[in-house]
Amino acid sequence: MKQQHGAPRRSARPGAVVLTTLALLGSLLPGNPASASPPAAAAERPAGTVAGAAPSAGAVVGHNTTGAVGRGGAGTVADRAGSPVAVALAGISPTVARPGDDVKVKATITNTTGKPLEGLKAKLAINAVALTQRASLAAWESLPLTERVASAGPGAKDLGRLAAGQSRTVDLTFPTATYTLQGWGPRELSLEVTGSQGRVGVLRTFLMYDDGVASAGRKSMRLTIAAPVTAGIVDPADIEGAQLQLAQEAADEGRLDQLLEVARSGKVSLAVDPNVVGLARAADSEDLRAWGESFLTATHRTSTYALPAWDPDLGALAHADVSQGRINGILNTPAVGKWTVPPSWNEGLAWPANGATDRVTVAAATYADRPFVILSQGTLAPTSPDVATSRADLELERGLARTAVADAVLSAAFVQGTDVTRATSVGVAVAESAPGQTDGAEPIGAVVPSATGAAAAQRLLAETAAVVAQATSSDTHALIATDRAWYPDADAVGTILGTLGNAPWVEIAPLKRLLGSGPHTVGRKPLPQEQPTERELDDSQVDRIDESRTRIIDFSSIAADPEELRRNSLMRLVAPLSVGYRRDPDQRQAAVDAGVQYAQEVREAVEVIPREGVNLISDRGDLPIRVRNNLDTDITVTVVLKPDNPRLTVTRQVTGTIPSFKEMNLSIPVEAIGSGDVTVTSQLFAPSGVQLGSESSFEVRVRAGWEEVGTWIVAGLVGLLFAVGIWRTVRRGRSPNRATVEDVAAATGEFAVTEPPADVAAASGTTTDAPHRTH
C-alpha cells in the first residue's frame, strides 16, 4: 500500500499486531531459549537497547508477569516461561481513577500451550495501599506466577474453554466506589487467570488513583522523551543501495514511517543524522523524496538536534587519541547530497553509542563543540533509585560538559511498550556491551517480557508518581532515551503520550529545555575515566582512517575547489566509523580497507612521469618534467628538483596548472658549473606544501662550456674547409678548356700584334709602330 505521508494517521496497524502476537507467543513458549537469555536477534540491533532497571530497582514487566528478573536473579525466568496463559494489557480507562469511577480493564489472554485449557476464569483485583517507592513498583511486577496477587475486587469472570494457541479479549470492571481507596498514588492491580489446576497466568500492573485531596499542592515533574534517528550503515560507494534500504524503512509501517508519525506528535524530541534527510532528498524515488519532505517538516514541529553526519563513533575516536581538531573535522564531514542542516535544528549534541561511555569520550565530544551529551545505561546515574533527575554538569580539564542522563527504568518501560521488534532484553545492549563488559555478560538491570503500550503507560504513570512523591524540590526533570534501533509503534507511543498528558503531575518538555536547564545536585555513580567497549573499532584502524583523511585533505589543495575534490574520499573514510557498523565488525573492516584504498588511488592520480637521462651541454638550460593528471579537475602543482651535486643548481621552482586527464611538461630552469653526471630527484608539491606521490630520479649528463667549445670547433672546421678549397684551386692551374688569344682571333677576325722580344728586334733592324688593323 502506498503511504500518503500527508494523510492522517491510520487507526489500525495489522502488521504491528501480528509482530506483537508472534513476540508474545515466542517469548512464552515453554523451553524457548529466548525466555532464559537475550535473543540472538538482539545482537543485530545497531546501537543496543536502552538500559533497564538497575538491580536494586528490579524489572520492568509488561503483559505476562508470571516472573521477571529483578533482584531475584535469573531463576524466575523459567517460572515465567512455563506460564500456560499469557496475559497482555490492552487498555485501562480511565488511566487515572478518581472517587466513584468504574475502571474498565481490557486484556488479551492467549493459550501458549499445545492443548486446550478448560474452565478458565479471570479475576480483577486491586490492593488499596499506595506505592511510593520505585523499588516497590519493580518488586510487584517482578513477582513470578505463583506469588501473591491483589486481593480486593469483584468476583471472577468465566472464560470457558481456550483452544491451543487461541487468544481472547476479556473486559473487566473495577468499581472504585465499592472499595476503600484513599489518597494519591499507584496501586497494585492484578488480572489473574485460573483453570482447573489453579493459576495459569497473571498480569501485574498498576492503577493510578487520585482522591483529589492528597494531590492538592503536590509538586510536578518534567519529562523529556528523546530518540536518535540515524540511517544505519551507509556505503558511499553504493548510495543507491542505501536509498533503497531507506525507502523500505520509509514505506508503509516501516521504521521511518513510524518515526515520522512520532515526530508529528511534537512530543518526542529527535536527534537526527543529516544523512537520513540527505539520502531521501537526493533519491530518484518520488515516495522517498516525499517522505524526506514530510519528515523535515515534522522536525520543525518538535525539538530537533543534529547529530554528526554518518553518526561516527565518538568512543572509538576518543580511545584512539585522535586529536581534538581532527575529531572536530570528522564530526563535520558533509552529508550525502551536500545536504545541510536547517536553521530550525539545534546544534552541539553528542549521543555516544548506546549511551554508555566514559570521561574521555565526553571530553572529546565537548572539545569538538558538542558539549550536550546524552548518557544512558546507568552512566552517571543517581545513586538513589528513587531519583530520576537528569541534568548533570561534568567538569573537564578544558571546559564543562552539560550531560543529560536517561533514567534506566523509565527508558526501559517506554522502549518495551513501543518497540515493534519487541526485543526481549532491555537491560543491556547485547550488540554493544556496556563499559567493562564483554559480549554475553550478565545484563545490567532486567531481562523482561514484552510490554504493550497500555502496560508501559501504567508503569510510567506509577514511576513518575513515585518520583514526585519522593522529590525534595520542584525542579525534577527526567529523560527517557531510546536507542538507535528503536522501531516505534506510533499508536503505542500515542497511547503513552496521551496517558502522560492526562497526568497533572507530569509535563512533557522538549529536549532543548532540558539541556538549557541547570544541573541537579544529587549523588551520582562515578564516570569511568577510560573504558573502551569491545565492539569499538580498533585503535590501529582508527589511526589508518585518521592518517588517510589528513593526507587527502592536504592533497586536495591542488584543486580550485578542494572541498569538491576531497568530498568522496572523506565520506568513504568516515563511513566505517559509524555506530551502525558495531553490529558487523567484518563488514566494518572491509569498509575501512576500501575507504583507505580509495583515498590512496585519488592521491596517486597525480604523479611525475619517470624519464630517462638528460644531456645538458650549456651552463644554463631548462629541464622538462612531465606531470600526469588523472583527476576530473584541473590541478595546480609545484615541481621541485634536487640535484645531488652542486655542479648543477636549480634556478627556481616552477608552479603550473595541469588540465584534467592530461599530461604536460613543466620546464625547470637550471645552471651548470663544470661537467659531470648528476642525479636529480624530482618532487611534486601541493599548494598546501604537502608532497604528492613518491619521488622520481633521473640522470643529467652535465657538460658545462661544451657549447662554446663546439662553436669554435665548428667555426674552425668551416675556415679550414674554405682554405683547403682555395689551395686546391690554385694547385690545379688553368683548365685545358680555357680559351686562348688565338681562339679569340679566329673567332673574331682580329689579331693582336705582339712585339717580338727585344733581342730579336734588334737583330732584324725592325721597329715597332702602332698596331695595324686590316680589314
Image: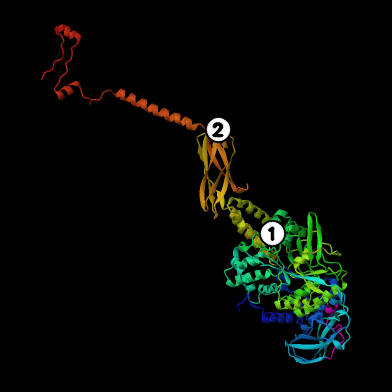
Q: The C terminus appears in which quarter of the rendering?
A: top left
The answer to whether residue 528 shows anywhere in this view is no
Pick whichever, 524 or 162, lies toward us: 524
Mark closest to the chain's N terminus, 2 or 1: 1
- List the residue tagged with mark 2: 673
173 with respect to 541 (left or right): right
**Residue at 17% over, 9% down:** 760
Pick whichever, 744 or 556, lies toward us: 556
Q: Secondary structure at mark 2?
A: loop
Q: The N terminus appears in which quarter of the rendering?
A: bottom right
Up-down: is 481 above or below 594?
Answer: below
**Label 2 amino acid?**
Ile
**Label 1 amino acid?**
Leu
- List the residue tagged with mark 1: 331
Main secondary structure along the magenta-highlighted residues: loop
Pick whichever, 263 or 116, lies toward us: 263
In this rendering, which labeled residue sits more in front, label 2 or label 1? Answer: 1
Q: Specify the label residue 463 is tagged with.
A: none
Q: Position of residue 683 (x, y in %)?
A: 59, 45
770 with respect to 639 (left or right): left
Q: Position of residue 169 (x, y in %)?
A: 74, 87
- Give the magenta-colored segment's residue range: 139-155
